[in-house]
Amino acid sequence: MAERLRAAVVGLRGMGIGHIKAILALPEMYELAAVCDINPETARKVSEEYKVTGYLALSEMLKHEKLDVVSIATPHPFHRECAVACAKAGVHVLVEKPMASAVSDADDMIRAHKRAGTVLSVVFQQRYQPLQRTIRKLVREGVIGEITRVHMTATYFRSDFYYKLVGWRGTWKGEGGGVLMNQAPHALDQYLWQSGLELDTVLGRCETFMHPIETEDRASAIVTFANGALGTLVTSTTDAPGIYRIEMVGDKGAIVFEKGKASIAVNNIPTRKFNSESRGEWGSPKAEWKDIVPEDPGYPYRSHDACFYHLGLQIHGKRSEYVPGEEGRKSLELADAIILSSYRGGPVKCPVSRKGYDEFLAGRIRAAERERRRTEERRPGKKRV
């Protein structure tokens, strides 16, 4: 292995600790050099625990440390600012999902790292799971033919207490959305990555169904893909028990993933061929469902370790399966399209209008701030000035 990469982590109160542990799990590839968090107590505690220098500002860390990699685990509205600053300093970046709240920010991050010649990678660790990789391979090899329909159910449960515990959750300013920005990004990524489909138009519906929050806790969409395939999806933080299921139907068969298992059925005759040639009234192609056995990916890493492993390979100019910014942007594009479509009341063409979405999001933030001020003024005992 080439010389170890000096890595730092910014944002230590969420997934940042997980990033630190992933870096330490790859001692031949990485050296943990520094940590950063705006909270002084958090920065002090983590820096002492891992025996590295702690900083309160990314700019100071970039100024005083010779770094190769920064992993960004701050709340996602700050991802753009951090990633662009790292690019300007010539530092490679691994950024947590989602890349940002708005696709325009993701665009800026990608452009900045292209100009700098540095690597920008996004944390979508589910892509490294053996079963997920095997499903993707079967689709790419055309085993079930051209995809004609894909459906995803990705539902979760979160209580009111979950949203009240941390003030930015469920807010337009703090998250830029609800379930689509926080819980669903991995599922949205799998939905697009496994199927290999490109977005065309999105008709979305977002609701605040159960929780006292500003943003959506339930969302659904009808998606038209570039090849004409039909997509549907539903996601929420209101369902108990939660369900995670992906169905992909092609001209030659189908794949279903649910509860950590997957099965495949391949037709004895392609659907379109049977449709045009059959002379029977009720017949259909014959198929037998079989379990999909995961293939060994050839490396021992599965989660965040795998994200850092492939990033390191990419930086060293070796063959890797890192997730570039352009790939990480795709699920954000879908999330933004669903939200924008819901509020506009009609289908949205992809790519999403960057200016249109930025204006929409800024408007939602302003409206939410006005509502908070009105609520505060109506509080009993509130003195009017």
Image: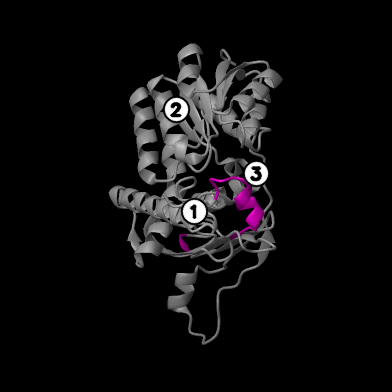
Q: Nearer the viewer, residue 251 or 74?
A: 74
Mark 1 → mark 2, Cα distance in angstroms:
45 Å
- Which label's residue is closer to the chain start, 1 or 3? 3
Q: Are marks 1 and 3 in contact (CB under 8 Å)?
A: no
Q: Position of residue 304 (x, y in %)?
A: 62, 35
Q: Position of residue 150 (x, y in %)?
A: 50, 62
Mark 3: few, some, or many residues within 10 Å (few <14, many ≥20)? some
Q: Name the image quarter holding residue 87.
A: top left
Label 2 element class: loop
Q: Nearer the viewer, residue 145 or 185?
A: 185
The residue that mark 3 highlights is 130
Q: Position of residue 355 (x, y in %)?
A: 28, 48
Q: Which mark is residue 376?
A: 1
Instruction: Residue at 66% x, 65% y: name it.
Output: 289
Q: Is residue 201 above or below residue 282?
A: above
Check disc 2 and give the amino acid type. Val
Q: What's the magenta region? A: 146-169
Viewed as shown, does residue 276 lie left or right of 297?
left
Q: Is residue 227 visible?
A: no
